Structure formats: structure tokens, C-alpha cells
Image (cartoon, grey):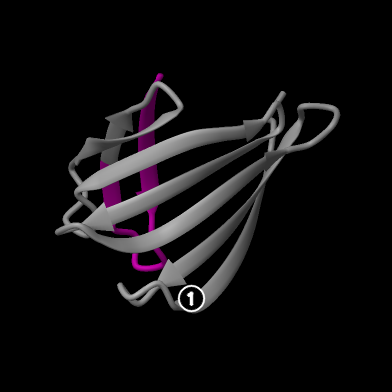
Amino acid sequence: MRVQIESVNAKGQTAHWGYVTDFDGRNLPVAGNAGQAHASVRVVDASVNEIVNSKDEVVTTRPTNVLSPDHNAITVIYLRDDGTGKTTGVTFAAYERMR
């Protein structure tokens, strides 16, 4: 699967980056994101996948995506890492399917 991210921050600045994954836990290159060089995605179960993002072989973030039972929303738990395995912050996001 090709993952493409397009975002706009509070200042109106845009970012476009992405990666390819087979959901097999392999660490694969990320293109277009200066803060992230690799992403590893693994399936936990039919509704959950975990991602490990890294730069220079140091883990930077560990998002977990959870698909709702009706398949109309995804909740993401973003864990920020200090590079030694310690979580330094947690952010939650919810995305709803647009119809």
C-alpha cells in the first residue's frame, strides 16, 4: 500500500510526504519528510495497526491506528519518543469518513 500524507499547519504551510508498506513490520524508506527517514507498519489485528517512525535509526514516534467497528472512523494514538524508548508525549486524533 502506498501511504500519502498531505497536511496544512496552523500557519498555512503545506507538507507532502509518504511511504510504501506491506504491513509486515519491515522498516522502509519515507520520502519527503525531513523529520522521518523510515516507517515500519505491522498489523495487530483486523482493526489495529502499529507504526514505528524513525530517523537515523532512532525511533521518533509510534502511532497506533484503530478502525471503528462500523469502518467509518479511525482513531490514532501518537506516542512521541525521546530516542531512548521513553515516551515524551501523547496526542490523540480522530478521523471520520467523508461521504
Q: Is residue 36 magenta?
A: no
Q: Position of residue 72 (x, y in %)?
A: 76, 30
- Judging by the rendered image, the residue that carries numbered circle 1 is 87
| Above-or-below relation of 8 to 89 | above
Left or right of residue 32: residue 96: right
Q: Quadrant of the N terminus?
A: top left
> At numbered mark 1, what does the secondary structure look like: helix, strand or loop?
strand
Given the current orientation, which residue lies at the most extreme right position? 70
| Above-or-below relation of 64 to 11 | above
Q: Looking at the magenta stretch, what is its main secondary structure? A: strand
Q: Quadrant of the C terminus?
A: top right
Q: Position of residue 37 (x, y in %)?
A: 19, 49
Which of the 4 image quadrants contains residue 73?
top right
Which residue is more in the foreground, 33 or 57? 57
Which of the 4 image quadrants contains residue 21?
top left
Label total for image: 1
Please name the amino acid that badge 1 sits on: Thr
**Label 1 crowding class (10 Å Cα cut-off): few <14, some 14-19, many 20+?**
some
| Above-or-below relation of 33 to 71 | below
Residue at position x 44%, y 78% from top?
Answer: 86
Left or right of residue 35: residue 10: right
Left or right of residue 9: residue 54: left
Q: Position of residue 40 (x, y in %)?
A: 37, 40
Q: Which residues are magenta?
A: 1-16
Residue at position x 84%, y 31% from top?
Answer: 69
Q: Is residue 12 magenta?
A: yes
Residue at position x 53%, y 61% from top?
Answer: 78
